Image (cartoon, coloured by chain):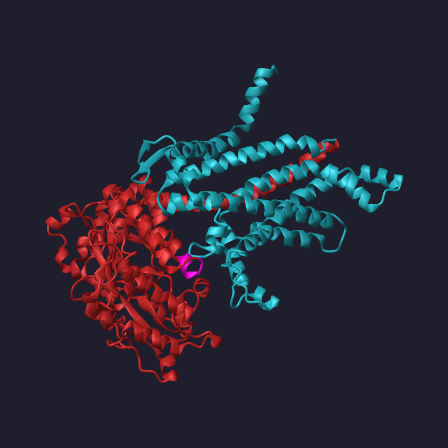
């Protein structure tokens, strides 16, 4: 009797706990399932009026208002089509997409990145728009800097260019004024950057001259290019990380942490470098044009900061241009409506909304000027002027998603001081070359 | 009722759980085992049979052995301490003190807190510059990025999360011990410690056995605190990276589900062996009255 009591009590407790836990879990998952099926059901059952709700997935929360404004404008023109803008943070975006693709549940329309495009296009998960282009429904020549070619594979078009981005040097005017140092300009080189960063640093106050962060596109890739190094060889077949010029550039950046001119890697992991800049604790930082509205929203440095071009290196001014595209799923239930929305996303009207809200530099030719004046207090033309200096984002291969995911794990060992920068760079090169060989 | 129809009825009654287990556990496990012997392409829509190639690669991978060591190290630190502290707290909370239910709720709260939210709080507490822990200790230790300390942080966070549930299980075990045993001991003039040592502990061993199995299996699967608190660009990651973390990275970040499956299948085997050992040894210490 005693034994039975003991066990029945114990198991009662276990089951109650498990029931609570599973109830909590399953109610969450039920919600998402319900939402999903509800959308599909609306599309499938309400045929007569053809009221549909399309899902538009994006990864940048900062651009959500602009994307919703575009969606609203589209629904005003097409009252039967509603758009649900869904933000999935960059960190989870491709994990979710790679699960959704084979399951046939990709969002109707979604943002595509050059680095991921090849995988999705070769798997036939994206709806080709070649016939629409040939029928003249959309003119890909409307978009700047050959951006449409990023989303072209084997002669098929898949994506409508959305925007492009380049990198700039953000600086805090107040910190420069206090130290009586002139603001960064076109004449700056990397030596000047390092020198001024040291002068502006007051580590005891938690203020640093430069955020020498562990980052690729808004970090050392620009340094490597400026110094005559490379990220990948021109034919995408070999890593450029073990190029002596690349290693030299990486070392120079890490040296700024050692010099106390930059916060440590751990400090920048605890608090993102851009956030430090926003709170006035960093005098200078490289950042992408997509962060403008985010930084400008900071009350602390409002009106006290601006942009300059990146410094020049031994060989040139480095920069990277990347263009996002909008694509549609090949397995969507409402492809006709999706195409209408995709076409609208590529229209001048959508580009103008993007520009006026300062969300991103629109790809549509002629609308960039509206973007330049979207924030008159900032020197935004550094971003469009540096297009000439920039190389395309080094994606476009099947191996990119693999090596790009592994790269920060190796480089963080150097940035955290566990191995030398040179060793890390060589390890990255080896890893990249292996990834390229394995995905041939 | 003959025995056959009794079996039919029995299976009928457990069918909901059985079907759920087979569909949501059995099938994925089988899939994982198959994936480990395959090479997948195009998001898993095309799979080639490659035999033991993934395992050959795995056993030559230095990182895998490091991850295995990390996992076992965590288990060795976490499981005994959790069992000990849970038992102590359960015994303390099994008395008649004021506000008993409040204490029980407080200890159980971590169990119903969102792990991600809790992790964020821990990150702030352990932060090097403005963290409360460094502030109180008057130190400037990089708890989260020093390879020597990161594991201890994970163990502390794990303890915080695990003690509540295990304490409750042990508490249930304690309350199932018949009062008559203690009354008999009182008549014999036993002291408090002796009652604990010779009545409470032996009577509690079935519960402790149960909790230790659950804890061990849970501990070998440590992932979320590494993912949320340490993070992928942390210099301390190699010294805390667990097998499940490596599984996640390979399957969902490097898009190599086959290598990930190989890792997780090794862990499955390890868990089977460890649980088997525990069952083999239960005769030596578990008392069933």
Q: Residue furthest left?
A: A135
Q: Is residue A5 left or right of residue A421?
A: right
The residue closer to the viewer here, B276 or A377, is B276
Q: Residue furthest top?
A: B2
Q: Position of residue B286 (x, y in %)?
A: 70, 34
On the image, which quarter does residue B182 sit in? top right
**Residue A415 lies in the magenta-colored region:** yes
Q: Is residue A36 left or right of residue A15?
A: left
**Residue A36 lies in the magenta-colored region:** no
**Residue under the image location 55 percent in, 62 percent down:** B125
Q: Is residue B176 left or right of residue A262?
A: right
* Numbered range of the magenta stretch: A412-418
On the image, which quarter does residue A346 sit in? bottom left
Q: Chain B is shown in which shade?
A: cyan
- Image vertical order of residue B166 relative to residue A348, above or below: above
- Image vertical order of residue A321 relative to residue A395, above or below: below
Q: Position of residue B107 (x, y in %)?
A: 64, 52
Labels in figure, total:
0
**Quadrant location of the N terminus of chain B?**
top right
The residue closer to the viewer here, A300 or B83, is B83
- Image vertical order of residue A183 relative to residue A71, above or below: below
Q: Can you see residue A69? A: no
Q: Position of residue A323 (x, y in %)?
A: 24, 58
**Quadrant location of the C terminus of chain B?**
top right
Q: Can you see residue A363? A: yes
- Image chain in red: A
The residue closer to the viewer here, B68 or B200, is B68
């Amino acid at each position: 009797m005693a034994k039975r009591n003991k066990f029945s009590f114990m198991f009662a407790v276990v089951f109650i706990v498990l029931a609570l836990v599973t109830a909590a879990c399953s109610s969450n998952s039920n919600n998402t399932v319900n939402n999903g099926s509800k959308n599909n059901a609306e599309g499938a059952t309400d045929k007569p009026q053809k009221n549909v709700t399309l899902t538009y997935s994006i990864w940048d929360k900062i651009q959500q208002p602009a994307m919703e404004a575009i969606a609203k404008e589209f629904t005003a023109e097409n009252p039967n089509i509603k758009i649900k803008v869904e933000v999935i943070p960059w960190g989870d975006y491709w994990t979710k997409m790679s699960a959704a693709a084979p399951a046939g549940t990709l969002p109707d329309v979604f943002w595509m990145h050059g680095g991921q495009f090849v995988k999705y296009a070769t798997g036939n998960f994206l709806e080709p728009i070649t016939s629409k282009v040939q029928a003249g429904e959309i003119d890909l020549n409307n978009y700047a800097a050959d951006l449409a070619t990023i989303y072209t594979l084997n002669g098929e078009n898949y994506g409508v260019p959305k925007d492009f981005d380049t990198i700039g040097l953000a600086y805090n005017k107040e910190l420069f004024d206090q130290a009586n140092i002139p603001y960064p300009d076109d004449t700056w080189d990397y030596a000047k950057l390092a020198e001024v960063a040291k002068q502006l640093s007051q580590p005891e106050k938690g203020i640093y001259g430069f955020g020498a962060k562990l980052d690729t596109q808004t970090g050392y890739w620009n340094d490597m290019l400026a110094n005559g190094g490379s990220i990948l060889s021109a034919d995408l077949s070999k890593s450029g990380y073990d190029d002596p010029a690349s290693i030299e550039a990486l070392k120079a950046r890490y040296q700024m942490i050692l010099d106390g001119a930059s916060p440590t890697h751990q400090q920048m992991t605890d608090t993102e470098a851009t956030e430090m800049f926003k709170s006035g604790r960093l005098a200078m930082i490289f950042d992408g044009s997509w962060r403008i509205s985010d930084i400008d929203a900071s009350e602390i440095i409002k009106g006290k900061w601006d942009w300059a071009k990146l410094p020049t290196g031994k060989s040139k001014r480095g920069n990277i241009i990347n263009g996002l595209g909008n694509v549609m799923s090949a397995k969507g239930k409402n492809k006709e409506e999706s195409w209408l929305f995709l076409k609208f996303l590529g229209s001048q009207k959508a580009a103008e909304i993007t520009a006026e809200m300062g969300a991103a530099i629109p790809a549509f030719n002629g609308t960039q000027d509206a973007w330049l004046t979207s924030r008159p207090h900032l020197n935004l033309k550094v971003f469009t002027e540096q297009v000439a200096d920039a190389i395309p984002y080094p994606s476009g291969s099947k191996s990119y998603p693999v090596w790009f995911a592994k790269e920060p794990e190796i480089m963080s060992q150097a940035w955290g001081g566990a191995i030398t920068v040179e060793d890390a760079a060589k390890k990255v090169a080896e890893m990249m070359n292996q990834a390229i060989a394995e995905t041939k | 009722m003959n025995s056959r129809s009794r079996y039919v009825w029995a299976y009928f009654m457990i069918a909901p759980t059985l079907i759920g287990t087979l569909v949501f556990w059995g099938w994925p496990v089988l899939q994982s085992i198959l994936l480990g012997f395959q090479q997948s392409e195009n998001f898993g829509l095309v799979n080639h049979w490659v035999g033991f190639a993934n395992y050959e690669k795995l056993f030559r991978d230095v990182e895998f052995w490091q991850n295995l060591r990390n996992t076992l190290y965590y288990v060795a630190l976490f499981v005994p301490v959790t069992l000990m502290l849970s038992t102590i707290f359960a015994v303390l909370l099994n008395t008649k003190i004021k506000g008993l239910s409040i204490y029980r709720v407080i200890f159980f709260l971590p169990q119903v807190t969102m792990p991600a939210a809790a992790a964020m709080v821990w990150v702030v507490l352990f932060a090097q510059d403005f963290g409360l822990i460094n502030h109180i200790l008057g130190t400037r230790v990089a708890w989260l990025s020093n390879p020597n300390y990161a594991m201890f942080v994970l163990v502390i966070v794990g303890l915080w999360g695990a003690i509540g549930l295990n304490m409750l299980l042990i508490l249930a075990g304690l309350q199932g011990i018949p009062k008559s045993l203690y009354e008999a001991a009182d008549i014999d003039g036993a002291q408090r410690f002796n009652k604990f040592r010779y009545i409470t502990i032996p009577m509690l061993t079935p519960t402790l056995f149960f909790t230790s199995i659950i804890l061990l299996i849970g501990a070998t699967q440590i992932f979320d605190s590494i993912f949320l608190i340490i993070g992928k660009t942390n210099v301390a990651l190699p010294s805390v990276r667990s097998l499940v973390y490596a599984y996640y990275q390979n399957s969902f970040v490097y898009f190599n589900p086959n290598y990930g499956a190989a890792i997780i299948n090794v862990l499955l085997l390890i868990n089977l062996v460890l649980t088997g050992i525990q069952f083999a040894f239960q005769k030596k210490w578990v008392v069933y009255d």
